[in-house]
Image (spheres, rainbow, N blue to C red):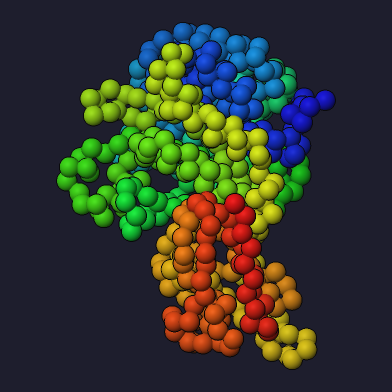
Amino acid sequence: MTNGYFDGSMPRKVLEYYLSHAASAQWISQSETLDDDIRVILKTGLKFLGRAAGIWKGDGDEEGHFARAKQAADKIHAADPEVILQACLFEAVYREDVETVPVPSWVFEAFGLPVETRNFNYDACLFPAGTCTWDCMPDLSETEAQMWFYYRGRRYIDCGYEAFHMGQIHLYTGRDRGYKGIGRVIEMLRAYGKANARRHKVIFDAHSHSLVVNGKSLLDYNAMPFTRFPVLDRPGEKLVLVREGKSGGGISPEGVYEKALPFLYEYDNWGGRDYWAYEHQTYEERAWNQWWGGDQISWFANQDEASRNSFLDYSFKWTAVNNPDGFFAFPLMRGIGPGGDGQDRTYKMNDRSDACPNGFSQEDAAAALLHTGYEKYRAFANPSMLDYGGKDEDDPETGVRYPEKVVLYGSFQPYVGAVADDSNSEITRMYYIGGGKYAFSFVMPYAGEYDFAVSTWGTLSACVSTAHPFPFSGTGDKGKLLIPQDNTAVRVTFDYMKDRIDVEMLS
């Protein structure tokens, strides 16, 4: 029995096995280089292919779409039966896709409605005009929208797909009070999957930190794109990642209470490169415009190969250190929007070759990280539930109260998403580990010499550093932080009563 075995039930350790070997494989079911894509999947050991099938705005060939989705699934599963393929049910629907599809009798029956001969009703799927983010957003409080989601989900299950990405779920459930509509759809698909899916189980995620109703999570794990902070003192378009929120807890679909559900990070896409920004904005303005004037995957794809490899390494280590419940969906295949010629392009991890002429040659870098695994860097991980401060705790020997806020500050801070020398930063606030000790871990993307110190109570009036034997005030007298190579994991611990700082590093 393999680590990825499941049938009808998926314990957390099995779910994490798949998430620790995850990739974003957007529309791989439509790939013209599928044979080479499968070669890369086997080489890297990928087991979970996110966004493998789905539509944002379809091509009008409903039956052809599902035929291709099944053909690709069959071919991938012939190469590795363990792989989970994910389909998408998104926050946008279009008239030409919805109104051309006849409603099958089994959809009416599943919803307890009289069977009739008609197509799906596009207008009945939508929010009232002018009440949502965009006009093509489905309203999951409406039965017709629920029927559309259930229809497409069930067809993907029949094609061999065992996971669903539900997009920006908090948008299209804006009128779905208590998440009753989307909850109904998810439970109906779970029930169908239990009887009909390849391994009698389907799993769900969405762009959410938490979707819990009456203590129970509707999702198996939460997922979000990365959050970034631009770096302006380096040549090129550099940025660092910033932790934003955490994965909420609750009773999982397996019936187990989790303090924090697993979490999946990805490089998202939403429009590609903003060529107008490159013509009309300054360097600094563009830095703050999305990801240097683009979406995440297009920014990544437009870096040179060495920078892409380094950022993959950084993203992987950053995830392991900043979120012990988190995993990184490597970009295997993702749309990067139109190029300067107006033609849509796709990022592919594949090495460039005759079999994949447009490959970005990232497969060796990804394979090395996937084969290394997360555990090496989890040793430095900040806890998922950050515990700040001593909670009115006193030193047992002297009776001195431990500080509630302790912050690591210095010139290194912009490289972890904070402002330099900000002694009151929440980004680099240290967490309490007991016994008057505090800790904080981060990944430094660039080698070099930086300075750092510890601010107690979040002020500059009582600071401690490795360069000074006693507390000092101000931004001077900081210690040196020597980073030996790019993407070094750093763990700093601070003993308040001893004014002692210890630094560990892991490359």
Residue 137 in the image, given as x and y percentages of width and height? 39, 33
Q: In this view, does 135 lie above or below 214?
A: above
Q: What residue sits 62% from the left and 55% below the top? A: 506
**For the point 52% across and 47% down, which residue is it?**
314
Regarding residue 142, the answer to whether it shows in the image is no
Which residue in the rendered view is the most extreme toward the left? 280
- Nearer to us in this view, 373 or 419: 373
Hey, which quadrant is residue 304 in on the image? top left
Residue situated in front as seen by the camera: 347 or 446: 446
Closer-to-camera residue (413/484): 484
Q: Which residue is drawn at 52% across and 60% down?
A: 483
Q: Looking at the picture, how far across and down is residue 435, in whole percent?
A: 74, 76
Task: Give the residue drawn at x 60%, y 15%.
Answer: 76
Residue at the far front: name it. Answer: 484
Residue 262, given in percent of the width and then of the height, sits at 65, 44
Q: Locate residue 225, reporting x and y percent.
A: 48, 43
Q: Is residue 91 above or below residue 454?
A: above
Q: Report whether residue 272 is seen.
A: yes
Which residue is the extreme one toward the right? 1
Name the quadrant containing residue 488.
bottom right
User: How many numbered circles does the render carry?
Assistant: 0
Which is more toward the observer, 324 or 63?
324
Quarter of the image for the N terminus: give it: top right
The answer to whether residue 422 is above or below residue 361 is below
Q: Is residue 303 above or below residue 394?
A: above
